[in-house]
Amino acid sequence: MSKHFDIYIVGVGGQGVLTISNLITQACVAKDLGVNYYPTKGMTQRGGFVKAQVRCGREPGTYSPSIAPAGADLVISMELAETLKAIPYAKKGADFVVFGDRWLPAGVQMGKDSYPTVEEVIGEIKKAGGNVIYLNPEDKPEKMRANLYILGSVMAHTELSELISLEFLQELIANKWPKVAEGNLATVKAGAEAKITD
């Protein structure tokens, strides 16, 4: 794996996109890795588009905070359709960890617009040369936080684990939220062990 590792994270407001990116950034800082965190918030309280870019393993001041098209090593998507916006930013061979949650825009709910199927999204990823790690939302235990669940899967199935171990991330999460550590760690573990589709 290259010493540089760029992560493009997408979803909608309320899903915990920024929590995922914050945790990865804090882990990189704690491991003394060069890191830049660049969040972009839309109408987060209304389910608007949210993205974050985390660039790991670079010397400060030597790179742009924005990931260039075809530059990301890893895409994490919390919402099925929003995955399509991230595809142009992924390298060929990049991993896509996709949580197939569906937040239907008003146009779709009113029958005016279409919404992509899981098969269509996976097909577009593969057409761009990406590797698919798909998580079915129905497999997630109901009371578990989706963002920590998908983060567990990220750590189990992508090269990010070569920079940050699952155990190190679990320790960070336990220390960040000590009162709910048991539940959060169980969620991360469930995500790491979750059934995936590729």
Image (cartoon, grey):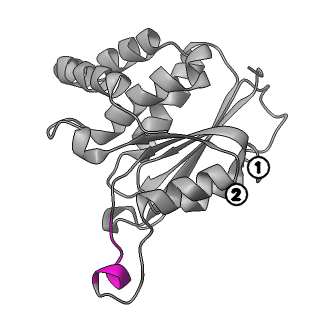
* Picture layout, residue 145 above or below residue 78: above
Query: Residue 86, image x and y in percent?
Result: 60, 55
Which residue position is annotated with label 1?
Answer: 70
* Picture layout, residue 173 above or below residue 197: above
- Residue beneath the point at 77% across and 29% down: 60
Amino acid at the residue labelled 2:
Pro
- Mark 1 and mark 2 lie on one chain; the one further toward the N terminus is 1
Q: Is residue 122 visible?
A: yes
Q: Is residue 88 magenta?
A: no
Q: Is residue 163 visible?
A: no
Query: Residue 48, image x and y in percent?
Result: 41, 67
Q: Residues within 10 Å of mark 2 (few under 14, many from 20)?
A: some
Q: Are marks 1 and 2 in contact (CB under 8 Å)?
A: yes
SS at badge 1? loop
Q: Is residue 123 left or right of residue 114?
A: right
Q: Judge by depth and name the residue closer to the eye, 169 or 115.
A: 115
Q: Is residue 139 left or right of residue 86?
A: left
Quadrant of the rendering where the N terminus is positioned: top right
Q: Judge by depth and name the residue closer to the eye, 106 or 99.
A: 99
Query: Residue 68, image x and y in percent?
Result: 77, 51
Q: Is residue 113 left or right of residue 127?
A: left
Q: Judge by depth and name the residue closer to the eye, 61 or 24.
A: 24
Which residue position is annotated with label 2?
Answer: 88
- Residue beneath the point at 44% across and 15% down: 166
| Residues shaded magenta | 103-109
Query: Residue 187, image x and y in percent?
Result: 26, 26
SS at badge 2? helix
User: From mark 1 to mark 2, how far is it between C-alphas?
Assistant: 6 Å
Q: Determine which of the numbered discs, if any, sits on residue 176 in the image.
A: none
